[in-house]
Structures are given as structure tokens and as C-alpha cells.
Amino acid sequence: MRISTQLAFTQANNIKGVVGDGNGNVYFCDGGGVLRHIDLDTGGVRLITSGLATNPTGICLVSPASALIGRNTTSVHLIELGSGFTQNYSGMDTAATTDRDQVHAGNPDTKIMLGASLSVNGRVIKFDANTFQGSNLAIGSIAALSSCVIVKPGSANFLVGWANGTITEIDANGTVVKTITLNVSKNIGTAPTLSVNSLALVNDTLLASTDNGVVFVYRYSSSTLLQRFLVSCSIAGRQRGGAQFTVLGNGIVGWMNNTTTNNVNALTVADTLPSGRIGQNMIYNYGLGAPVFFLGCDTGRRILWIAHNNRLVLLKFTSDSMTDVEALIQDPPGTAVDGRVIRLRDYEGLGSTVVTDQSIAAEATNIPARKGETYLEIILRGSGAERKWDWRRFNV
Amino acid sequence: MSLTHERSIALGFTPTDAVNDLAADRVVVISTGQLKVFKISDGTQVGSTASLGITGHTVTMLNAASALVCSFSQSSADLVEIPNGFRQTYTGGGFIGVAKAQQVTALDGVGYATSFTLGRLVRFDPTTFTYTETALIPAIGNSTATVITTIPGRLLVGTNRGELVELDQNLNCTASMSIVVGTSPDSFQHTTAGVSFLSPGTLSFLSYSDPFVIVSSAQGWLIKIHWPSKTVVDATMINGSGNLGVVLGPAASGTVITGHNQNISANVVAEIDVRPYPMELRDMVFTTSSGAITASGISGGRAWAAITSLNQLLVFTVVPQERTTKLAAIADPGYVPGRVIRLKDSGIGTAVVELDTAIGASPEALPVSTGANIIDIALYGEGLDEKASVSEYST
């Protein structure tokens, strides 16, 4: 994946929240109480409304036509995006004031917003755009602050990260469906308390970023810890420590390593493999020398946005370095059969690495490969005395 | 391998650097004012505490009996006799490049430290007991040396501009490279206006695991370089909030011990296997409270890490991956030379490369994990005549 173009917008006030609808529209609010819209197809920016709360806690969509902005009080703005008509609703805790994504999560399909509570343990805030009611949800017996919330993809449920290292899946009424407690073994003495500050769920792979710079990777359905790795850890606690995730498409996540040294701010992209192993692909330097607060993506248009202070940057990315290379197993020749395909990228003289290890059905199956690279492909099928293999080398 | 915490040794001071003593099982730790030696297998201090005559920031063992301590704030060095703690201060050198670990090393008993002066090192000659700044080293040129270590028979210097310079004992350049992270097989980057993204910036720590050099940088990079070909084969962003990058200790069996060199809550001591691609974080242990890892290493089957705030030397039992050997041979029909790629297979989706090596025209015993399902791929011949063979077995 490469970044091909970028477009930067500089605002008079610091940006306080960015959200996209996946259909070419991005909305962002700032500390001056202004909500703006960017048309990703034209790059055009228009003012939706002004006079909003000057220190909003974030933005999310609660329907295709309306956004919710936390007011940094016990109420929220509900804004009709076409007209800018704004109505305030109360009844919930103040949302967390962390200047980052995932404070509010809205599901435009169900018209429910859940958000992290600023100061009440074990609670998330809720706004129901069907009934226009704000409320708070007590989540089990968690004695910690909620720190991030995302909509569970393809579901009406939400995933909530907590400041005590817990991740809960809850329904819109706050009923706990599933809980994962981050595995912090091994530890010396008392187990550390980590804050889950960003979440991404892609296919069945859950990534959780924590304030001490450790990213946990789980197979979500089985709660199996697959991998842990280190990223930046610029700010401890429930604020912005660790990386921030966004989902770029099926099987791919990206995150900003919030590095404040020497003007490096790295956007890393990873394919989530069946084994949960992360193939990282460092692609972008934000170069502004401060943590990125907001990160998102319009997958269909292959546009990322990142925002820091008063600057929002759109990045057009391409996957022109990848292409599909067909895998097909025939036995005998002319008869397609199923089997296992293992592909190794071959750095002749420098080693090799497994990049694909999967089953394919009795048909031609496209598997992505990187242009300019050399691959070894091993085919395995059958078992016992019927075990067979074949191989090929190809350049992409 | 895996790490299991064995003990925490109270240092009684804030560690600024630590190195393996040349005697196995012993680690030399310094603070800004003292030097102590600990036996890590039982946590006892060996010999006397040495009071430094300088503000100590970095240490190396010159030989089995003496340690050299250098300073970022003084142009002097301390020579400390181990284990009796006798200390002598020598002046006339220069300030080291950075106030951190891995700023001094020893080659053939001679001490070499980074220098705050552009293009130079500081040298301690144990035969004349002189501590002097070297002449300009052209290969370092207008850069500042920010990290130094030894690789077999050579010094390896990292600079503030992302360069690696290999020097012989006469300080002649035998190899060098400017690291360009964009050449990694899996790393691409976009250059924004006014920002050079091609260099990893100031190099912080170095580790050598033949044939790879592992580098961390202040920008947060962890980079793996195939040193014979000067090729960046892996580059990932691991941490960069501090000015020092992540700590890397000397490699042992392809493993380096690392940790955040900044004062964070629940720091980690992590074990990275640098042999596979991508490099693999095999195990990690969380610390109990905030603290920066200032130095790490492996000695005598144990890993260690010096941590501030707690002011401890954390010691870990290192459990190596159980391995045996399995004969590999390529026959067509007689033995022929070729290449063997050995995959560890725990089911579909899990295969990883354990080994990728050339073998000669005879059977060779190659390492393999025990209790594992293995797929061996043998490749031989070239071009259109290249052939392969695949075999599967359990160990």
C-alpha cells in the first residue's frame, strides 16, 4: 500500500472530532464550535453549522443524515447534517475528554450512540436517536472508567475498552455479551493495570492498544491471545497512550504510532493473517511532531484522514503494489481439487517468510501478492499415504 | 525462548548503564556515581562498590579485570578494577555523544567511546593509560557518533544521521551504510514537505546477530539489516516517544532483550527473535511500576534488564526453544548442494520459517524444534533447471 496524494486543511481552532460515513463524506468539529463537511470526491469543504460547544468531546454519526457531538457537559448536540439544524439533549454523563477517536461510537443503522464516561466508573453514556433519549448504562461490575467504544462490525453491539484492561462486548442496553481481560502475564509482582485506549475488530481478529505501548491481538471468537507487540507509548493513562486504530478494509488495520520525537508520526498498516500474525507495513510519516488525535478511513475511496491540533490531512492510498495471483490445484491435470497453499516470499540470499498459508477449494482462488517480489508456492493435499505435494516459483 | 522472572536485585542507585562482566553470570552496573558487580544467579554483590570520580553514563569491560566508565558531562573516564573497586580517573578525552548506555565498547582491550565532537571517537589506551579524542574519522565525517558496539573484529558506530560505520582497530573504515528505511521489503513511506523520512534519525542501540545488525533509533524504529549486503530487510516502528529509542542488549542465539527506555508505567522487558521475518516478539514480562529500561543483556542462560525508579536489576530465566537436529540432504541421484527451507507447521495458517540455509553436497545436521510438525523444502539447481522436493515429518 502506498500513499499517492495528500490534501491538508488547516483550521483556526483545534479539531476535536472526525467521522466519515463511508460514502465519501467526512465531518469534523473543532474547538471553535464549528462543524464542517468534506466531500472526498471533490475535496470541497462546507460549513454545516457554527455556534456549537467550543470544547466538544467528539463526533459520531447516529443516522446517515445526523451527527452527534458531545458538548463536554451532560448533554449532546444532535445535528441534521443537511441543514445544520441542531437540538440539544441531556440525560447522560459528560463524555471523556481525551481528544481522540473512539470516545463516541454511533451506529447509523440502529441509531444508537454509546460513549466513554468522563468520570463514572463502570458506565457508558447512551443516546438513542430513535427516541431522542439520553441515558447512562451501568456495565456489569466494572470498577474502572470506560476509555474507548467502537461499533462491533456487522452487529448492533458495541465493544468497550476500559481503563483496567478489560474489553466488553455489550448490546445497546448494556448487557454484557462477552468479556476479554487482557492477558498481562507474565508480570513481576502485582499485575499491571493497562488502559485499553483503542480497538479494532477485523474479521475475527481483535486488536487492542494500551497506554503502555503494548498491542494485544486476539482471535475474538475464542478469546485466544495470538500476539502482543510494542508500539509507541507517549502518554500514559486513559488519554492517548499507545496507538490509534482504524480499519482500512477487509483484513487490514492501520494505526498511528504516536511518536513525538524528531517529527515522526508513523502510520502502520497490517494485514491480519489467519494465524493472527501481523504483517506490518509502515507507510507514512505525518511529520508534525505530535500525536495524531484522529485517524479514519473511507475504504471504498481509499482515503485516510489524520488530524492533529488544527490540521486535518487526507491521504489517498493505493494498493498498486499488490495484485492477485491465482492458485489452483489440479489432480489429475484438468481436475480441480481442494488443498493447502503455502506461499513464501523469497528474499533470495536473505531468507524467506511465509506470507500465505490457507486452504483453497477445488477452484481457482485469487491470493494477493506483492509486485516485484519472488514467491515460492507449496501445495499440499491428501493425507497419509495419499499425501501429495507440488511447488512452483513465480515472480509478480 | 521464553522469559521467566527469577529475581529483582536492589541496586541501591539509579542505573545508567550495565554490561555483562566477562565472567559468566555477572553483570556490571553503574549509576552516575557508583559501580557495582552482581552475580545474577543468586543476586549477590561481588566485591566492593566503586565510587566513581566522574559522572558515569556508560560502561564497558576492557578486560576480565577492569571496566571503563565514560561521561556525557565530563571529558574524563574512570578505570575500575573488578572486583575490588579500585578506581583511577583519566582526563583528556571528550564527552561521550549521548548520556545513555552503549556509548563505550572495547576492541582487543582498547576502549572506544562515542564523542560529542563531530566525526570523532574517544579512545582509551590501557597500555599508556591515555584517554584522548581521536582524529577526525572521515567515515563519520560531519555526524556525531551516538552508539558504539563491537562486531567480530570490528567496531560498529551508529550516528545521529542514521549511518552505520564499521571500523577496524586502526579506525579505518571497513564498511558503512546510510540506513534508508524505505528499502525494506515491506516498508514504504511518503515524504512530506520538509521532512526527510528516509533516514531513521539518531541511532540509539545496536545488536549483532550474525549476519544481521539490529538497530533502534530515537524516532522509534527497529531495523534489521543484513550486514554483509547492507540491506534493510525489516523495519518497524516500535517506540519513539523518548529520545533514546528502545534498548537493545547483545544478541544471544538470535534473541535480543528490549524495553522502553523511558519512564512509563508497566514497562515491559521483551524478547525479540530477530531471525525470522518479520522479527518476532516472542515473550514479554510486565514490570510492576514505572521506570525506564536503561540496559539489557543475556548472560549465562539468564536475561537481565536494568530499570530506573525501581532501581533494580531484573533477572529472568531464559528458557530456550527446545531444539534438536535433523539430517538434511539433497540427492539427485547423488548428493547435490542446494537450499533447505524448514517450516514449523502447527496447522493451516500457522506455518513459519524456522530455517532457510544453504547446504553442501552431503547430509548436514540442521537445527529443528522438538515436538513439532515440520515441512522441509529442498531447492536445488538454477533457473529453468531449478528443482524442489518437499518432505513432512514430526520431531
Image: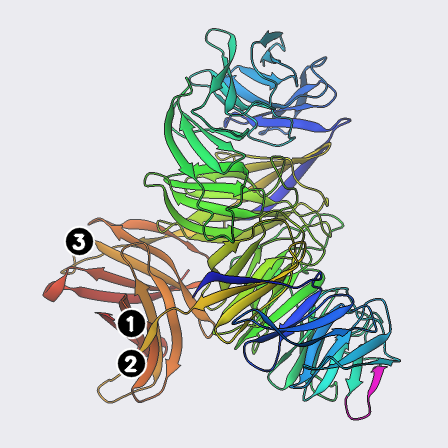
| Mark carried by residue B376 | 1
**Is the Cβ of the residue at disc 1 closer than 8 Å to that at disc 2?**
yes
Q: Is residue A24 above or below residue B177?
A: above
In space, the residues marked 1 and 2 are separated at their CA atoms by 9 Å
Residue drawn at the location 52% of the way across and 72% of the way down: B41
Q: Amino acid at mark 2?
A: Ala
The question of residue A17 being in magenta is answered with no
Q: Position of residue A22 (x, y in %)?
A: 50, 28
| Mark carried by residue A384 | none
Nearest to the observer: residue A156 or residue A222: A222
- A230 left or right of B203 in image: left
The question of residue B127 being in magenta is answered with yes
Which residue is labeled 3 in the image?
A337
Helix, strand or loop at label 3? It is loop
Q: Which residues are magenta?
A: B126-133
Q: Earlier in the sequence, mark 1 or mark 2?
A: 2
Q: Amino acid at mark 1?
A: Asp
Q: Position of residue B205 (x, y in %)?
A: 65, 66
Chain identity of mark 2: B
Nearest to the observer: residue A76 or residue B164: A76
Q: In the rendered view of the protein, which quadrant contains the N terminus of chain B?
A: bottom left
